[in-house]
Amino acid sequence: MLFFILALLFAIFMSLPFLVPHLGFMALFGFIPLLLMDTIAELRRKKCIFVWYFIAFLMWNAATTFWVCNATIGGGIAAIVLNSLQMAAIFGVFRLSRKRFGNLLSYVFLALMWIAWERFYYFSDISWPWLTLGNAFARSVQDVQWYEYTGVLGGSLWIWMSNISIFYFIMFLLGDSLKEMKASIKIGLFLLCVVVVGSPIILSRVIYTGYEEVSEGKVNVLLGQPNIDPYQKFHSMSQTEQSDLLLNQFKTELGDSSDRKILLVAPETFTNDIVVNDIAGSTSFGHFQKFLSSYPNADFLFGASSYEYVSSVEAPSLTARNIRKGLWVETHNSALMTDYTGRHEIFHKSKLVVGTELTPYPRVFNKLDELLGGVMAHCSGQDEISLLHLQDGTPIGCAVCYESVFGEYCTGYVKKGARALAVITNDAWWGNTPGFLQHLSYSSLRAIETRRDIARCANTGISAFINQRGDIVDKTNWWMRETLEGSINLSSRETFFVKYGDIAGLVSTALFLMLLLILIIKAFIPVKK
């Protein structure tokens, strides 16, 4: 019963930061119930503790990401269970390390191992970094302004340092050694705990208060939120009707101001008929060109399910699907920029969602997918980030949906020269759950890491403008047809995180590998009884 209570407390403490605004601080002590559980199990020589680790992580994952099941029941359950197993495995290795490393070093090993695992998740084919610990502060942005130096894995490191510091202080309070300590040592331990937990918050508040928005010009933006139910998208409305709906929204806001210089933005996968080999010949593209002829100073950024046809005897790539003999098709989730001249640029989403967009490790799983009848998607992305440009040449980086969760990836837009960022997404698959709010909040972290204004356009909400401090300046309502007009600042400044990348994650990973090697060596040395 005690272990269940501790597992439940852990799940509550770690879930609330992802579910309720301004509760990010709870992650600073959220792991203490699990650390206490481990200590009690050690003292009682309790076996099968791995099961309790798994139960604790299963409750946390289910409470925070249950909404994935709205889009795919099988995929949602798999994500929750597999993520929980990996987290439990980390604690299992930590428990084994205590026999070789002793107490303090084993806790350091645990923290470094966790962060190394989070970093690995950012680059693997099967990638689910939604619950990266540093994301716990996505709705508490005033506390993590220093992410411009470290990124979210710096937040993960802070969370572990705080949990371990508080846990050790609790152990001293409960232990007999406290009675024998000098008062100065007791005060020192307490102050150390306060510094580790509190100083990053104080530093962040100072940065937040003193930060001045960098503005090297502005771009006026009009976000279109058409509010089309994706489950009815291809049944209740034709693509022409959907395009008319959105363009009429824009027309209502623009009126007769044909000379307005403005960027119009539509959400992810708004159209489904863009052929990469012949973009100008696509029906939707022609529809948009006719509209833009009345607004020659407007640029239009929109999302599209796009297709590229390839004539080839053999498969041109691992992701291509065969249509008929000699003809293959590549599918993409794309962002396009155009204007009244017919000029167009296209960017294909690279960070793809496993199952619904991507068959992971295709050399291994493609044959299995074929045996199952092609149940997994075969989208392909770009090998390298590219930017989209306004008529005047202003470069914009556009993250497509899931890409906005990947901090170091998004710095690539800025390194390429993006002076502002856009995010286009369709979060309606999850319904009215915490999912779309979590996804929105992660864009605030990208704004802090890159110090770029962000214009975020979502099909059913929430569309928003986010400033360089990560504040949501203005936003639409959920599940309402709306437009939202605002402006975003342009900047060419590069943050430390943009210039040098994820140093916190790299250093933590390197130290973890070093300790892992030592642990493996020690495993062959008999433990003295």
Image: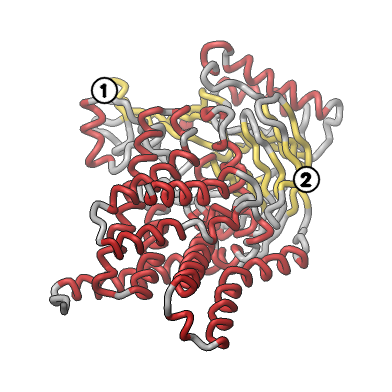
Q: Say if 523 sits above or below 399 in the image.
A: below
Quadrant of the rendered image containing residue 258: top right
Q: Residue at x 57, y 77 (%)?
A: 190
Residue on which disc 1 sits:
373
Q: Secondary structure at mark 1?
A: loop
Q: Say if 425 sits above or below 180 in the image.
A: above
Q: Specify few, some or many for label 2: CA neighbours under 10 Å numbering under 14, 14-19, or 20 or more.
A: some
Return the x and y of residue 363 as percentages of the image width and height: 24, 41
Residue on which disc 2 sits:
487
Q: Say if 373 sits above or below 181 in the image.
A: above
Q: Secondary structure at mark 2?
A: strand
Q: Nearer the viewer, residue 162 or 38?
A: 38
Q: Nearer the viewer, residue 438 or 293?
A: 438
Return the x and y of residue 140 as percentages of the image width and height: 65, 54
Q: Say if 361 sits above or below 447 in the image.
A: above
Q: Residue at x 43, y 52 (%)?
A: 6
Task: Evaluate whether residue 347 shows in this view.
Answer: yes
Return the x and y of residue 283 as percentages of the image width and height: 57, 20
Q: Residue at x 78, y 42 (%)?
A: 486
Q: Is residue 524 left or right of residue 213?
A: left
Return the x and y of residue 501 as percentages of the image width and height: 50, 65
Specify the quadrant that holds the C terminus.
bottom left
As shown in the figure, which amino acid type bears the numbered disc 2?
A: Ser
Question: How far apart in space, not on screen, are marks 2 and 1 (Cα)?
Answer: 47 Å
Quadrant of the rendered image containing residue 506: bottom left
Q: Earlier in the sequence, mark 2 or mark 1?
A: 1
Residue most extreme to the top: 236
As shown in the figure, which amino acid type bears the numbered disc 1?
A: Gly
